Amino acid sequence: MIPLDQGNFKGVSLQNMSILMVKKILRDGSPCAKCDQAEEILRKRGYWEHIDRIVYAREDASESEGMKLAEQFKIDLAPFFIVDDDPGTPRIYTRVFEFIKKELNGLSVNSAEDINSSSSESSESATLPKSRGISKPTNLPSSPFDINSAKLRYKKSDPISILHDAQLHFAEDLTLAFSGAEDVILIDMAVKNQRPFTVFCLDTGRLHEQTHAFLDAVRHYYGISIEVFTPSSELLEPFLNEKGSSSFYADGHKECCGIRKVEPLGRALKGRRAWATGMRRDQSPATRENFHHAEIDWEHRNENGRPLVKFNPLLDWSSDQVWEYIRSNGIPYNPLHDEGYRSIGCEPCTRVSRPGEHERAARWWWEEETLRECGLHIKAREEGA
Ligand code: SF4
């Protein structure tokens, strides 16, 4: 986070210069059209990778980081850009073309003519906090996703910005994995971003009835469809015939999770180019220590054989942050949480949490801590592509 109270912006520094873009979110939750136009201009001209961090100024939240920056720098237009050298005094721009000219040497890329003709557009900025532009999703050109640059930028981004970036780049080719409290936050943020996305859910056949009710509540609350994937009967029936319905207590959950979760996940991701999860690092420090906000998912590939990109926007959030978001936004959650369940999976493999124990201790509690992953979140190998 930017140390606002110091009155001096210091963002992430790449080659002695860091650039922060502040975009506005309107009172009704929709993004600012002018801000999106500016982003599109930067993307089309190949400058987007120079933006180190995006911050949102929410009209309805004076405490939002972007509104605080606007106040700090006495800005009443959006978007605006803050450029900081190391050491240096921040330079502020409220016009995207001026920003390009003065900071990004834009004239050498698309010529002065191009920039000057573009700058004849009626206005580059919207006012803060009264503007009323509503963004329409645009299908931007599908350039390759730069995973290494994204990893750097996301270290300084908030979850909604990460998700926005994913939605902007992948549109409907991005699908959100939905099952728990964290996942409904992703849906909430994706809806607020007003960008295309899809949602899927794995119905293992062993979920609590309260979880099914929760799924329906989310469907209705957001007016979205959730694609449901169930286990393949060709795999499930022989497994049940041979081992019965509770073999996981005797020989571990891997085989059952493989059939009820991992195989359906492969089908859910077919035809996609990216997916997002509500995974948090502290849910399982023993297995998630080295995860990133964006990773190459080598286990799942599209029809061209290219691996998917996996986004984990909430990776650094704590359970408290999750519940603060759910309560302050009044969004649906699984009623089992009110009965003492903290981490919820399949009914036979989930129990009520005991006081003081880690939330993950109530999942597959009969197994070693390092084995308590269902196989959906295998650590991506170090990216080389
Ligand atoms: Fe099977 Fe339990 Fe895994 Fe669900 S969580 S798929 S019931 S082993």
Image: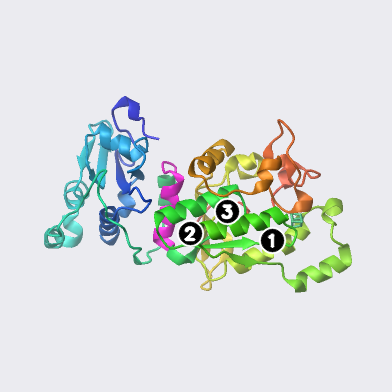
**Image coloring type:** rainbow
Residue wearing tag 1: 261
| Prevailing SS of the magenta stretch | helix
* Foreground disc of the pair 3, 1: 1
Q: Are marks 2 and 1 in contact (CB under 8 Å)?
A: no
Q: Is mark 1 within 8 Å of ligand 1?
A: yes
Residue 334 inside the magenta-drawn segment: no
In the rendered structure, the answer to whether residue 246 lies left or right of residue 193 reads right
User: Residue 310 placed where, x, y %?
Assistant: 52, 56
The total number of labels drawn is: 3
Q: Are marks 3 and 1 in contact (CB under 8 Å)?
A: no
If the picture is divided into quarters, which one holds ligand 1? bottom right
Residue wearing tag 3: 381
101 lies above or below 318:
below
Residue wearing tag 2: 385
Q: Amino acid at mark 2?
A: Ala
Disc 1 element: helix
Q: Nearer the viewer, residue 383 or 74?
A: 74
Q: Amino acid at mark 1?
A: Lys
- Mark 3 vs mark 1: which is more N-terminal? 1
Please name the residue shown 43% across and 46% down the image: 154
In the rendered structure, the answer to whether residue 346 lies left or right of residue 96 reads right
Quadrant holding the N terminus: top left
Residue 160 inside the magenta-drawn segment: yes
Cα gap from disc 3 to disc 1, whole angstroms: 21 Å
- Mark 2 vs mark 1: which is more N-terminal? 1
Cα gap from disc 2 to disc 1, whole angstroms: 27 Å
